[in-house]
Amino acid sequence: MIDENNGNKLIEGEDFYFTPEGYKCFTEKHHLKRGYCCKSGCRHCPYGFDKKTGSNKK
């Protein structure tokens, strides 16, 4: 049997890592795979969103 949802699974070290505080932090690669900016001010946002101004820098 083939797992059809296999493409949606997150891979630690590739899609995310845990911060020293224990939080899950998504990588730039994960954000690019998702394909859009969530406008949450993510640490590794490849879209350049600035939460303070509410606009994209890039």
Image (cartoon, rainbow, N blue to C red):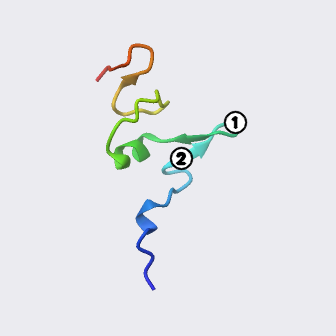
Q: Which element is circle 2 on?
A: strand
Q: CA distance from mark 2 to mark 1?
A: 13 Å
Q: Which mark is residue 41?
A: none
The amino acid type found where label 1 is placed reads Pro
Residue farthest along the right direction in this orientation: 21
Q: Which element is circle 1 on?
A: loop
Q: Is residue 32 above or below residue 54?
A: below
The amino acid type found where label 2 is placed reads Phe
Which residue lies at the image location 41% right of the left edge and 73% below the top edge? Answer: 4
Tell whether label 1 touches label 2 (CB within 8 Å). Answer: no
Residue that carries the numbered disc 2 in the rendered image: 16
Q: Residue 5: horizontal and vertical position, in percent?
A: 43, 68
Q: Residue 7: horizontal and vertical position, in percent?
A: 41, 64
Q: Is residue 10 left or right of residue 37?
A: right
Q: Is residue 19 left or right of residue 53?
A: right
Q: Is residue 17 left or right of residue 7?
A: right
Residue farthest along the bottom direction in this orientation: 1
Which residue lies at the image location 64% right of the left edge and 37% below the top edge? Answer: 19
Which residue lies at the image location 51% right of the left edge and 56% below the top edge? Answer: 10
Residue that carries the numbered disc 1 in the rendered image: 20
Q: Residue 52: horizontal and vertical position, in percent?
A: 44, 14
Which residue lies at the image location 46% right of the left edge and 27% below the top edge? Answer: 41
Give the quadrant of the N terminus: bottom left
For the residue carrying disc 1, how many other residues have a C-alpha within 10 Å: few (<14), some (14-19), or many (20+)? few
Q: Quadrant of residue 50?
A: top left
Q: Is residue 5 above or below residue 52?
A: below
Q: Quadrant of residue 51?
A: top left
Q: Is residue 50 above or below residue 24?
A: above
Give the quadrant of the C terminus: top left
Q: Residue 3: horizontal and vertical position, in percent?
A: 45, 76
